[in-house]
Amino acid sequence: MAYVEEESSIQSPDLPEVDNLLKFDHFGNPNMNLNIPCPSTRDVLSEALIRAQLIGRSSGPWYLGRPWSIRLTRGPISFFLVKSGQCNVYLAEKKQHLELKRGDLFVLTQPSELVLSDGDVDVREAKALLDQVSLEELESGKPVRFGAGEGKVTNLLTGILICHYRDQVSLLPALPDYIHLTADVIQQSTTLQKVFDLLEYESTVVESGHVSLKASLLQMVLVLSYRAFLQSVGIEAVDQLASLSDPEIGPLVTLIHVHPGLPWSVENMADRVGMSRSAFAARFVDLVGETPMSYVTQCRMRRAAMLMTNPHANLKSLARQLGYSSEAAFSVAFKRWSGMSPGRYRTQRVKSTANAL
């Protein structure tokens, strides 16, 4: 696979100078520079947040009178902190129920159908969020009240963020797509509690810079929540992080995430970590759960899906950026991965008017 500098039609700051990453033999064929510095595995979350270009969409307190239920048809990146009462969470795709008590926090980072309720409502009868409250009310940051209001009121401190690239397949594949932090875990994070307090305060006032400040606070909640989660369970307890915690495979996996378009091969990956090809392939499969080249393809396709939300993206240039020698080769790989051609995928996503809420 050839690697060529991206053309000007692709607006992406991802790639460093080619000369820093590649060296060429006397025939002009590119080889991997084994001295490419790997990003720190500790900074994987920062890398994902920067790449996703998260924007704080709305935040503020919700007051829900029983009985109440909310359906998020394509649940965005969001969090819900139970200030009082209780909240049940139903993850439709996983057919999984969670019960949140006072002080608990639920964070969702993988788009999926989500139902929040007081526990007494059949999830099949849950109404869409925007059928119960307007988008203007949500984005105002002021307290929002809905539900029947006949019984005990549940108070949720909420935050919703969106990706600049709405159809990014995953914010961070290496991390769980949702986490549930109990009140005990949150109480151990003084910083997270202070951020919640400041977010609540900013929801009660309208002062200069409050929109920008709240957007930053929403990102801080996301980072601090995952930090608290990893501190409470340990990296070794999360299967998805096993590859990143490995001293040899971890830095390599991170580099693949950051630069999927480099001319990766099993040979140059094995050389990079100082292992034989067979030993490296076996270790990679054991830690990551798939072959090295299959993993590279997955990273490339996720990046492609993200970049194709840009209606001005040139597919030929995009194919080269992702390490494919031709647009045709890229199209075959993408269709095998997504079930549709790149052009059809991009058209559907760009023209989609579905609201993330």
Image: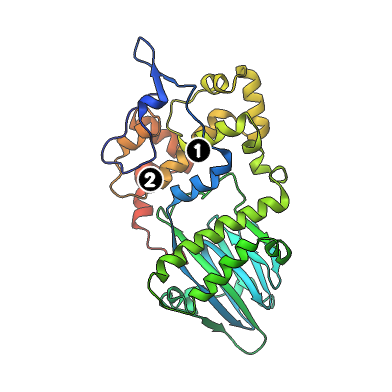
Crowding near the residue tagged with mark 2, few <14, some 14–19, many ≥20 C-alpha atoms within 10 Å: many
Q: Identify residue for label 2.
A: 307
The image shows residue 157, relative to residue 78, as above or below, that is below
Decide if residue 47 is on the left or right side of residue 187.
left
* Mark 1 surroundings: few (<14), some (14-19) or many (≥20) residues within 10 A: many
Kind of residue at badge 1: His
Between 338 and 74, the one lying in front of the other is: 74
Taking depth in this image into account, of 337 and 59 the one nearest to the observer is 59
Residue 296 placement (x, y as % from top left)? 51, 33
Mark 1–mark 2 contact, CB under 8 Å? no
Q: Is residue 64 above or below residue 268?
A: below
Name the front one of labels 1 and 2.
1
The three-letter amino acid code for the residue at tag 2 is Leu
Left or right placement of residue 21 versus residue 223 in this view? left
Q: Position of residue 336 (x, y in %)?
A: 47, 37
Residue 23 placement: quadrant = top left
Q: Where does label 1 land, which residue?
A: 257
**How far across and how far down the image is residue 59, in percent?**
49, 71
Where is residue 236 drawn, in percent x and y? 71, 42
Could you tell me which residue is drawn at 32 percent across and 39 percent down? 315
